[in-house]
Amino acid sequence: MRGVGSAARLRQYLPAIAVFLAAIVVWEIATAGPGRRVLPPPSDIVGAFGENAAQLRKSALATFYESLGGLAIGTFLGVLVALVTSRWASVRGVLLPVAIASSAIPIVAIAPIMNNWFGVLNPLSKMGMAALLVFFPVMINVTRGLVEVSPAATELMRSYASSDAQILFKVRVPNMLPFFFTALKVGTTLAFIGAIVGEFFGGTSDVLGRIVLQSLSGGRFDTAWAGIFLGAAGAIVSYLAVSLAERLVIPWYSSLVAQER
Amino acid sequence: MTTSQGPTEPQPPVSAAVRLAGVEKSFPVRDGTTTVALSGIDLDVAPREFVSLIGPSGCGKSTLLRIVGDLIQPSGGTVQVNGKPAHQARLDRDYGMVFQAPVLFDWRTVEANVRLPLEVMRFSRAERDRRVREMLDLVELGGFLSHYPHQLSGGMQQRVAIARALAFQPALLLMDEPFGALDEMTRERLNAEVLRIWAQTRTTVIFVTHSIPEAVFLSTRVVVMSARPGRITNVVDIDLPQPRTEQTRETERYFELVTEVRESLRGRITSSAARARAEGAIG
Ligand SMILES: Nc1ncnc2c1ncn2[C@@H]1O[C@H](COP(=O)(O)OP(=O)(O)OP(=O)(O)O)[C@@H](O)[C@H]1O
Ligand SMILES: [Mg+2]
């Protein structure tokens, strides 16, 4: 079943790739004249990549590092809280409203506070922003995956006189994994948003958020766009990495989903 | 009522695989009243018997099976399994359960699904592999070890569930309409398979079904139940010779027994229809 996949998958993505290339061409033509002032043409952006290669690479790596760090922290805390809340319903009653309230906090307002806590130059202050955004979807999804187990499955396990730990590891956790990967995919994008928003509020200069701000104030729109593209590329790469991990860890799931389509 | 008689009763002989005495079950309903699902159930099942429970929908067959399996508690009466309380029997892993839906885990292959109880019960790796293979051969799914459940037909999934229930050689097999969702042909084939397995493993079976022919073909005894409140109205001994084959379904005795079970079931239906008519006349 899997061997057929790669060719079929390529064919599935072909229209998207074609649309993307067409958009680039239209963009190039539309911004060739005075449009350049509104939006730099792709060729200028590519040029900006060349001129600032060293700085852009350094910044992209720094932002990538912050995002992944925040993704790891947010995921870890999200799973931890989910495990605790799914185990004790009373804890769920207390923590869930708090968690929901925390997701309502405007993230931009938190950035200066993170700078206060961890130090403006410490990458932890940006990771904290990323982690905050990642935490909520991970916690909610993982809790659902752990709790929403079919009653028949628990009944079957009870008929074997299984321990709670066995029910957790043989039923709840495997049941949760598809939910976890869904949340993690959302989390990759959120982590980049969190990190870059954090960078807007000060810190080391060689990070994508600062590059974008500084290039804009210096009228270097092409460099700003190069930074934006690098941020998007980072998010896409980590999304694809999570998708790959998903296919390796829960191979049964993609096969099940493919059949249900 | 008749609930507190347990301790004064004589100890049941160990020879009964299942002994139900005065079992009652009522469920609280939202408006404060209760539904009496089972009332005054007395039943002894001998070791190696194949007993079917048959009765109209809602008469408490599943409830009774779940009480025997210690998945729910009776409101009254006693349940002894192999001479001990049902709860102890569950802790001793005396039960293999097969539900109406196969309840296979999506993330486990056929092989791993059958292995599940063996993992839970900490069988050695070698023993696990041996038994999984043996059980899957028994249900003729030896060639599907690494398939996932969604890659199997409904009948195949149900056979995996049976293999899983048999893997740890439980003393008592409890099956709740395992073939309810299958077509007649598949059902008859699986009936033959269940009998072959039963003859081979010599476990005691309690089997819930809606199908009269299925009950007669499989069982040594058929327990006929009626609803509101759920109770046992008749027990039909099935004296068809063993082993049973497709020819059994064509013998005169088989048809007689099918008729007898049907009449027992209809007995209730006729009387309730009469009652409904009477009530209609009054109202
Ligand atoms: N958890 C429950 N709460 C309340 N009432 C219940 C519950 N489980 C069963 N009942 C009631 O008990 C009665 C018997 O239910 P049960 O499921 O045992 O019937 P059944 O004989 O298995 O029916 P079927 O053939 O349709 O499966 C029904 O009236 C049902 O409404
Ligand atoms: Mg039922």
Image (cartoon, helix red, strand yellow):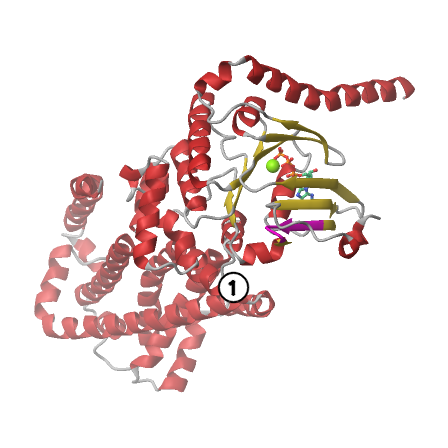
**Region rendered in magenta:** B78-83
- Which quarter shows the N terminus of chain A? top left
Residue A213 location, quadrant: bottom left
- Residue A69 in the image: x percent, y percent? 30, 73
Q: Is there any visible trace of residue B118 in the rendered image?
A: yes
Q: Nearer the viewer, residue A136 or A193?
A: A136
Residue A227 drawn in magenta: no
User: Which chain does the residue under circle 1 lie in?
Assistant: A
Name the amino acid type tagged 1.
Ser
Instruction: Find disc 1 in the rendering and name its residue.
Output: A86
- Residue B24 in the image: x percent, y percent? 74, 45
**Mark 1 neighbour density, 10 Å: few (under 14) some (14–19) many (20 or more):** some
Quadrant of the picture in which ligand 2 is shown: top right
Looking at the image, which residue sits at the far right?
B282
Label 1 sits on a secondary structure element that is helix
**Residue A124 to residue A95: above or below:** below
Magenta stretch mostly in which secondary structure? strand
Residue A64 location, quadrant: bottom left
- Residue A249 in the image: x percent, y percent? 29, 56
Q: Taking B32 as reference, is A87 left or right?
A: left
Say if disc 1 is inside 8 Å of ligand 1: no
Q: Taking B49 as reference, is B120 left or right?
A: left
The residue at the point 33 percent across, 58 percent down is A185
The residue at the point 31 percent across, 45 percent down is B133
Q: Taking B121 as reference, is B152 left or right?
A: left
The residue at the point 79 percent across, 51 percent down is B3
**Residue A209 to residue A228: above or below:** below
The residue at the point 71 percent across, 53 percent down is B11
